[in-house]
Image (cartoon, rainbow, N blue to C red):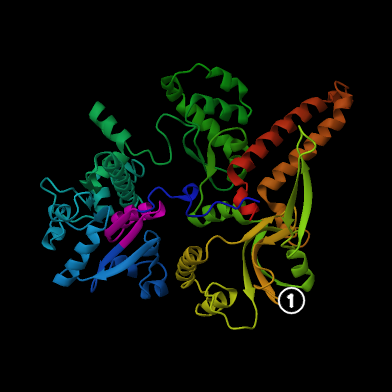
Amino acid sequence: MASLPDDNSEEHLKPFDGIRVIDFTHVLAGPSATYQLAVMGADVIKIEPRHEPDMYREIGDSAELAKEGRGTEFLSQNGNKRSLSLDLSAPDGVAVARRLIETADVMVENYRCGVMERHGLGYEAVTALNPRIIYCSLTGFGHTGPKARHPAYDVVIQAYSGLMAANGTPDSSPVRVGPAVLDYGTGAHAALAISSALFQRSRTGLGQCIDVAMADAAMMLMSNLVVTTQSTGQTPPPPGNQHPSRAAYSAYPTANGMLMLGAYTLKQLQRLLRAIDRDDLAEDVANATAEEIGERRDEFAELLTNILATRTADEWEAHFNDAGVPAARVRRIDEALQYFAQYHYDGVEKMFMKYKVTSDDITRATSDESSTATDTADSSVTATWYEGKNYIPVPSAIVSVIQVFPFDDQATNNMFDIRYQLRLNDLYDFSSTSIIHYQMTMQQLDHLSHILVGEKPVRFNQHQNRLYIDMDWNNDITADEYLIIECYRKIDPTTYTDIYDDIYLKRYATALIKKQWGANLSKFGDVAMLGGVTMNGETIYTQAIEEITKLEEQIQLSFETPIDYMVG
């Protein structure tokens, strides 16, 4: 049986594997840029001043994490990085930095203009050390112009760029945008610029200097408003939750919660109108221009205000999404995270199962099963194939096996066996303040395990209920020893009945019932019932088939567990 691709194979190679980034950034904009590169596989080495580390280490809603230098504001954009402390005011510290730069592909910094030059690490000095390096500098206002040396943070650029004035309503503006959108937007622009420079270097062999200004990024993020202002000479008023010309691209209160509609195109507007049983209006606007739709904004807004108040935001969201209309209940961040988690993790649990190896297991695993194959064109040509039976049976509820650990009472020098893992776990109390550090440590151990041990010799398919373990069964294990199997197991819905409350499951079950109901009624097509009702079984059946097809496509495209998760 063919083995799964190795994580270091070309199939699993990340875009920036082998790229080294020296990261002299702090706070948000710069670290978010280098974080994007790290996620794409780059080896990012974050360098912080010895006596003045990144100030965001001490910032966040968790006081305990902040005391440990791992504030939540710091963790959000500094994962996947290595860390080094250097005193750049000392010659030895600068010498170390210069040696690192000589080995690097990219250097990123976000200090004020002139700071890196004072340390002898400006672009001219760095490119003399390494002509191929991509040097990216992030500042508030860029390296040229009268504000080049002025300090800035996200909120300052929000005010300077006009973003605050563009936010809110005509009565409440200016209003600061809550999340640090300009910090993260600038980081995204920098990551894109660095990626482009790396691609250009692959053609020319030359490095370059990239100047990324938060003020420039802010204007780029408001391009539509900037172009409108330049074209008309007037700044668009802040719209708040209501689009100035499209009523179906606005937010409305419902019977419970606020609903944001995103029916921007004419086709989406028609779907929206049909979804609220106003086919007449849908036909009426079939050939309408954008200007004509804008002229009817107040009419549509009043219609939507009245009808959306009759049901909850959750009900309308499901109803409109099924009709192909973009819509969502306005959620808090914690609600959004919970909603997404439902589709990815409900129904299975991660666990460790303990299995005691028997002498029968060893006897079976060390024997082969033969089969004969005959050539289809020449029956006199045959071949005997041997298949190893080095497997153990697993419960039918197991859907995926991650890895297998040996577990015995003998001393071990294998740092990747289960006993080492359990000893490591004992170092942590698994509180909310240590779990992130623990997770990062476990990821590093997994990486080392893969380098030193190689691909995990485990093959599993849930339909066979056989866990194949490719090892020397005569020498690597003896009867009465235990194996610890890290796996995912289906949760029994008869015990944990909340599974039946899954949104997709309820819709799919309803569609299946509707299909059967339509099939049963189809034999009575066009039969008139008391009260003038006519049997429409064929129509019900056809609608059910369409709903089932749509739901199956939805689960496959959006929610289905990937193949490499189901098959170990």
Most extreme residue toward the top is 287
- Residue 520 image position (x, y, % from top left): 87, 32
Most extreme residue toward the front is 380
Q: Nearer the viewer, residue 402 or 111?
A: 402
- Residue 68 image position (x, y, % from top left): 38, 75
Q: Is residue 102 magenta?
A: no
Residue located 19% across and 50% down the image: 131
The answer to whether residue 199 is left or right of residue 498 is left
Residue type pointed to by label 1: Ala
User: Which residues are drawn in magenta?
Assistant: 19-45
- Residue 246 image position (x, y, % from top left): 45, 30
Residue located 83% across and 25% down the image: 533
- Residue 509 image position (x, y, % from top left): 75, 43
Q: Nearer the viewer, residue 300 or 27?
A: 27
- The quarter of the picture where the C terminus appears is bottom right
Residue 425 falls in image quadrant: bottom right
Q: Is residue 24 magenta?
A: yes
The answer to whether residue 366 is left or right of residue 212 is right
Badge 1 marks a residue whose secondary structure is loop
Q: Nearer the viewer, residue 443 or 281?
A: 443
Q: Can the viewer see residue 336 in this picture?
A: yes
Q: Residues within 10 Å of mark 1 (few under 14, many from 20)?
A: few
The answer to whether residue 329 is left or right of residue 224 is right
Residue 416 falls in image quadrant: bottom right
Which residue corresponds to mark 1?
479
Residue located 46% across and 72% down the image: 433
